[in-house]
Image: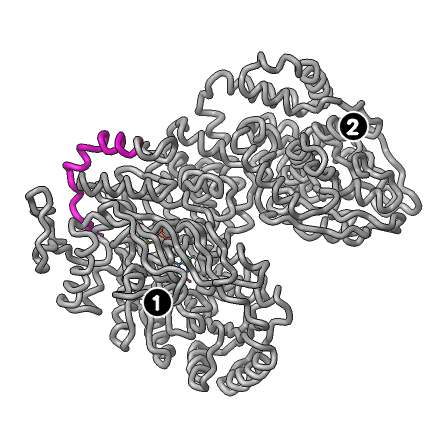
Amino acid sequence: MRTDFTLAQLADPEIDAANTILRTCVHCGFCTATCPTYVLLGDELDSPRGRIYMIKNLLESGQPATAKVVKHIDRCLSCLSCMTTCPASVDYMHLVDRARVRIEKTFARPWPERVLRALLAFVLPSPGMFRLALKAAALGRPFKGMLPGRLKGLVTMAPARVPAASAVDRPQVFEAEGKRLKRVALLTGCAQQVLRPSINEATVRLLTRRGCEVVVAEGAGCCGALVHHMGREDQARKQARANIEAWEKAGVEAVVINASGCGTTIKDYGWMLKHDPVWAERAARIAGLARDVSEIINELGVGELTEKGLPAVTYHSACSMQHGQGLSEEPKALLAAAGFEVREPAEGHLCCGSAGTYNMLQPELAGRLLERKVENLKRAGGAVIATGNIGCLEQIAGGLAGGTGENKGPPVVHTIELLDWATGGPKPEGIP
Amino acid sequence: MKMPQPDAGVIARRAEIIEAMQAIVLGEGVITDEEELRVYDHDGLMAYKGLPLVVVLPETTGQVSAILEYCAANEVKIVPRGAGTGLSGGALPLADAITLGLGKFNKILEIDYDNRTVITQSGVTNLAITEAVEDEGFYYAPDPSSQIACSIGGNIAENSGGVHCLKYGLTTNNVLGIEMVLMSGKIVHFGGKHLDSGGYDLLGVATGSEGLLGVITEVTVRILQKPETARALLLGFPSNKSAGNCVAAIIGAGIIPGGMEMMDKPAIHATEDFVHAGYPLDVQALLIVELDGPEVEVDHLIERVDAIARQAGATHLSVSRSEEERQAFWSGRKNAFPAVGRLSPDYLCMDGTIPRRKLADVLQRIEELSQQYGLRIANVFHAGDGNLHPLILFDANEPGELEKAENFGADILRYCVEVGGVLTGEHGVGIEKRDLMGVMFTEDDMNHQQRLKCAFDPAHLLNPGKVYPTLHRCSELGRMFVHKGKLPFPDIPRF
Ligand SMILES: Cc1cc2nc3c(=O)[nH]c(=O)nc-3n(C[C@H](O)[C@H](O)[C@H](O)COP(=O)(O)OP(=O)(O)OC[C@H]3O[C@@H](n4cnc5c(N)ncnc54)[C@H](O)[C@@H]3O)c2cc1C
């Protein structure tokens, strides 16, 4: 489409990149149909096509973002369903990232919002802080009635019981069982290891069983996605650089990620740092090594099956998995290869509402999406729900919780926990 | 593009109108901020833009009725808008009109397998209807390439077609009934679950009315059982001409394929890049021919089409081996327009329809014009029914290119009419082809058409400035409409 940037504006490489993206959009509107917020709200302003146009106007004007624009950009889940749909391959992901940075730099949010965002950006990436916060929240539960708005929601969301830290998440090397086929680094992540330490444990077991030497690298931490989606570019880049350095030192053939939200970001490190002369090449190299755990297992095979009579699994494809990384078939194929009957829910392309910190920042829309998702998942009828992203896992488990008897939903686990179980690991918690 | 002079009086009453709208539609459904209005400033045709007075997104037929009643009483114009995928500018906003969006009319109301009908709100997408019934083996036949996003209400307003309309008919052949709100606010029902109603075919009148006669709020469509077998052939040709001849030969042999589509080389390359459907890249033209029905019939027809294609000089022949592959063959075609976005930042999509035997001739003429204007072209079209979609590629950032593209397009359409065809096959007239209506119709024809409009909307409040190049007072057309003691638009500008 037509754009109107001045030459001076285009001299900024970020604007130049945005211009290139905008020009590929032909405004056909196909993306509106698969956008969760448009499906809910039916308003062009809350559709990808509308946002693209709004971002164009925002960037062209050179003016600070206004409250209205911020409202609609904030409502975007960054689920990237639009990118799967777009026949012109408009790079919406990087465009909306640019808008978020512009908002972060030019828009003064009301202070409660600012405090909430700062809190999330500070606490979530650090497992120690996060664990502490969850414990505090558990203690705070009885008093949640006294808390203001969204803080109340956050405390409600926190699990009643916080598991102990797992030994696998400390920097170390796990040897391969049998012949070593690969040396890989495992991103142990931030929130996931606190909420479900069993996922990294299962991943290490499965990878080593399949011939991988697994390195938990010293100095690697949060991938940066959380703050990146809040437009906090500098903090995201800092976290990315720390990881790149750590994995370079580890000397690995692949960086394995078992949370697809993180995987999408790490695979994009090259873009994130492309204007940084010192880091650009190094970032691109690490991004090229990044693999979702399902990709690696797909390459190595699931291995020998030890369990029979496995339950039917409803597979929930995380948006970051199917839209962000384009991995739709691999995880399902692995589950089938491990002996599970795989079922797919209706509207599988729609987000569950988790989307990083979205469920905390946009609880109303997230709640409506969750309700819809849970309905579809239940209808699919599997005895277990599997997914490859901690955000979805917690969100959906939360949506299913509370029901009793007939209404009690199936347990929600990570795909890798099921693959590990089918090939010699323990049965994941919650499966009868 | 010249539009009617906005009514300064209405614009001056904006605050009052907004207040009235907010009393009818609560919350975010009334959009008034300039920044937000700008997002609604055009539809699928990006060449023309304009800010609406206000955007209103009602949720119920009652609200639509209340809005129209207020607007009729206060002489405020209305531009209906479905999903905004229209390619002729039908939903282009007007500065003195409310853009009435039906995005929130997104619920399917009833599925009736016994009667093979679905009742839906008008904002539901075309594809959503098929998705709702496909588990039971049914589908809604007309399938515009934009079916993922366009609304069923918009389909009726444009009488949209699709790749399967060759055999199964256009929208008008598949819609059984509608609920429509007239400009007065009155809610009317045309048709129903039955095939025919007594009296004039008002449903037929509303179909293709481009938002000029009423606002469609509810729709009853017929659903069909999926054919037992459907397989698609990819036929590659060394020239547009040989492909065009093959189309004529297939139809000439009495075969009616489920769909028969053609793409030329630039379109093949752009779409293959996106869908990886396995299109041959070394051919000049590609035909996708689908045959459906009982398996024996399909097998037999494939053989016959195969033989005809070979005789016409096909250099590539392949048949879909699975349902996924058949879908993949179509997926490229259905994504063709936007996929062309890979070749060029902007395109204009033409929609002329010609007698099938003129195909090769018209393609030749388009090629000459392309040379003459110095603008590239990608051809995608419903070959089976002679509906062409030449996509004129241009760069709107280059001064003068849009005008050049427009002139090029007008020349193509004039030629289509010259060889015995029509201006539009399925995208509607809107504003894009408005000024070419005279090439097709005499003044008399158009006056008669506008008399029909007067019967529904005597004050010309619904989507004015679209479809007809001149706006006549209804009184001039032989029907006096006096409202509150005065004639509407006492000094309507001629444009
Ligand atoms: C990539 C692409 C491919 C396309 N392919 C095809 C194709 O194969 N075949 C085809 O026929 N068309 C095609 N189109 C054109 C377009 O999708 C159709 O015309 C479609 O029917 C428009 O529906 P909409 O809901 O987007 O309507 P809009 O664009 O919102 O409106 C179109 C017109 O209908 C009126 N209108 C909309 N809703 C209502 C209502 N509820 N009541 C009264 N009036 C209403 C508007 O006033 C306007 O005049 C394509 C468009 C694109 C962008």
Check the picture and name the quadrant holding the C terminus of chain B.
bottom left
Specify whether residue B343 is in view.
Answer: no
Amino acid found under the numbered disc labelled 2 = Glu
Indicate whether B352 appears above or below B79.
below
Q: Ligand 1: does it lie within 8 Å of the C-beta at label 1?
A: no
Amino acid found under the numbered disc labelled 1 = Asp
In the rendered image, which quarter is residue B234 located in?
Answer: bottom right
Mark 2 Cα-neighbour bin, 10 Å: few <14, some 14–19, many ≥20 = some
Q: Residue at x 84, y 50 (%)?
A: A309
User: Residue B105 versus residue A131: which sits nearer the camera?
Assistant: B105
Q: Position of residue B271 (x, y in %)?
A: 51, 61
Q: Is residue A422 left or right of residue B488?
A: right
Numbered range of the magenta stretch: B1-22
Q: Does the magenta portion include A66?
A: no
Helix, strand or loop for disc 1: loop
- Give the labeled residue for mark 1: B196
Q: Position of residue B368 (x, y in %)?
A: 33, 72
Helix, strand or loop for disc 2: loop
Task: Give the image quadrant in which the ligand numbered 1 is located.
Answer: bottom left
Circle on res. A218: 2
